[in-house]
Amino acid sequence: MTLLKRSDWYDIARDTNWTPSFVTEEELFPREMSDVFDVPREAWNVYDEPYKTSYREYVKVQREKDAGAYSVKAALGRMNFYKNADPGWLTILKAHYGAIALQEFAAGMSEARMARFGKAPGMRNMATFGLMDETRHGQIQLFFPHELVPQDRQFDWAHRAMHTNEWAAIAARQTFADLFSGRDAISVSIMLTFAFETGFTNMQFLGLASDAADAGDATFSNLISNIQTDEARHAQIGAPALKILIKNGKKEEAQKKVDIAFWRSWRLFTVLTGPMMDYYTPLAKRHKSFKEFMEEWIVTQFERNMLDLGLDKPWYWDIFLEELNDTHHGMHLGAWYWRPTVWWNPAAGASVADREWLEAKYPGWNDTWGQCWDVITQNVLAGRHDLTLPATLPVVCNMSNLPIVGRPGKGWAVRDYPVEYKGRRYHFGSEPDRWCFQQEPERYAGHQSLVDRFVSGLINPPTIPGVLAYMGLGPQDMGKDAHDYAWAESHRLKAAA
Ligand SMILES: [Fe+2]
Ligand SMILES: [Fe+2]
C-alpha cells in the first residue's frame, strides 16, 4: 500500500481546533485549567512543535523500546547481579524507584491536562503521546523492582513511598504537585516540560545511566536511558509555548514560573541525585562528580536553552552556582544521620579514599563537611553507633520540605530565611525558597511540613518512634548504614599507620 509522507498530511490532521457552538469558549477551556496567562486563543495557532510523530510511528517505536528494555532484563539474570552488587548501588536503585516510579504516573496526569486543555493542537497532540510515555515509565519502573521485593522489603517502596508520609516522599509530592498537577496546561508546559524535563531529567536518567553502566548494572542503565528517549521528545512541548508567551508580552510571568520550577527541581535533586553520584556510587565506579554533571548538563545546556528562547538567567543564578559546592553534601549528611527515616540504606561514602576523592572534587570539603564526618567516624570507631543516630527532627524548609542545611566547620554558613505571613512564621532554607513562597503565599500557606505536623500534635506519640510510625517505616523498611560501618575501619588503619 502506498502511504503519503507524514509531512504531506500532518499539519491538516493535527489541526483539530474548531469553533464551539454548544458551549462558550470559557466552558471549553476554563482559565484555571487552560491558560492563566490569558493569551488570546488565536495566538496559539502558530504553536509549532519541533518534534513531529504520528500514532503509527509512535506505537512502532515504543513497542521496540519496550521489547529492548524487557529483553535486556530477561537476558541478564539479574538476581545474581543484585546478590553480588555493592550495597551502595542497591541504595541508588531503591531511592530512585521510590522517588520516581509513581511520580511518572503523576506526570502522565499533567500530560493529560495539556492534551485536554492546551489551546494549541500541536501541544495537545504531543501531550497525548507524552501521556502514553509517562504511563509506560510508571509501569516499567514498578515492574523492574517488583521481582526484588521478596529479597528486600525496601524495594517495595517503589510502590509505597508516595502513599506515605515519609519526609522525602512529602518533599517530592509537594514539589511535583506544585509544578505539575496543580497548574493550568500552559504553566505545566513550561514548568514540567521545559524547566524540569529539559533542565533536570537528563541528570537522573542519562548521568545516572552512565554511572550504572560503569557499575555493571546494564539492566538499569538500559532502562533509564530508554526512558530518557521519551523525555527528550515530550520535553519539547514547553519551548514553543514559551515563544508564544514571550511574543504576547508575557515574558515576565513566564520567566517567574520557569525560575520557580527550576529552583524547586534543583532542591529535590540535591537530596536524590547528589548523594547518589557523590556518595552511594562505589568509589571505583565514580568518575564525574555531581557538580561536574550539573555543570555539564544543567549550567551550560539549560542556560543556553533559556537565553536562546529570549529568557534571562534566573535572578538567583549566582546563588545556585554557589550551592553546587555545598547543598547536596548537607542533604547527604542529613539522610545518613536520619537513616532510620528513609527507605534506602545510605552509603556513608566517607572512607579515607572516599574523602580524598571528595577533597579533590570539592576543595575544602575536609575543613567543612569533613569535620562533621570526623565526629561521626570517631563515634563509629568507638562502637558508639547510638551517638550517630537522631534523637530529634531537623529544621525543615517550608518550601522544599527538606532539612535546612548550610556549610559547617570552617566557613560556617548556616542560616534560616524566615517569613511572617498571616500570623504564622515560616522557615526557608535559602533566599530563592523564600522568594518562591512570596510570589504566591496563598498557594503554599496551608501546607504543613513534617516538623509543623510534629509541633502541632498531629504525630503521636511525639517521639522518634512515633515519627517513624507516622512515616510508615517498619523495622524492615528503615534505612541503616549500607556497608554496616565497614568504611570507618579505613580510618582506624590510617591512624594505626
Ligand atoms: Fe517520564
Ligand atoms: Fe516526562
Image (cartoon, grey):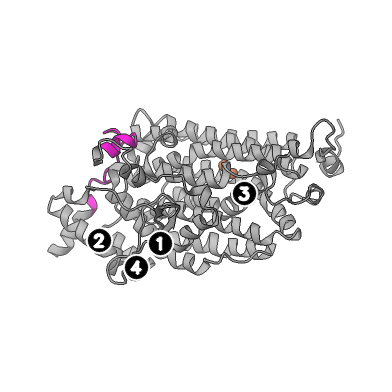
Residue hosting label 1: 417
Residue hosting label 3: 193
Give the foreground label among 1 and 3: 1
Q: Earlier in the sequence, mark 2 or mark 4?
A: 2
Name the mark on residue 372.
2
- The quadrant of the picture occupied by the C terminus is bottom left
Name the mark on residue 451.
none
Q: Earlier in the sequence, mark 1 or mark 2?
A: 2
Q: Quadrant of residue 326?
A: bottom left
Give how far apart the Cα atoms at labels 1 and 3 are: 29 Å
Residue type (three-letter) at the residue carrying disc 3: Thr
Q: Earlier in the sequence, mark 4 or mark 3?
A: 3
Ligand 2 neighbours mark 3 (CB distance < 8 Å) = yes
Give the foreground label among 1 and 2: 1
* 350 lies above or below 4: below
Ligand 2 neighbours mark 1 (CB distance < 8 Å) = no
Provide the secondary structure element on which disc 2 rests: helix
Q: Earlier in the sequence, mark 3 or mark 2?
A: 3
Q: Position of residue 187 (x, y in %)?
A: 64, 49
Residue hosting label 4: 413
* 141 lies above or below 366: above
Residue closest to the far top: 150
* 252 lies above or below 197: below
Numbered range of the magenta stretch? 466-487
Residue contact between numbered discs 1 and 2, judged by CB atoms under 8 Å: no
- The quadrant of the picture occupied by the N terminus is top right
Give how far apart the Cα atoms at labels 3 and 2 are: 38 Å
Image quarter where ligand 2 lies? top right
Q: Is residue 112 left or right of residue 481?
A: right
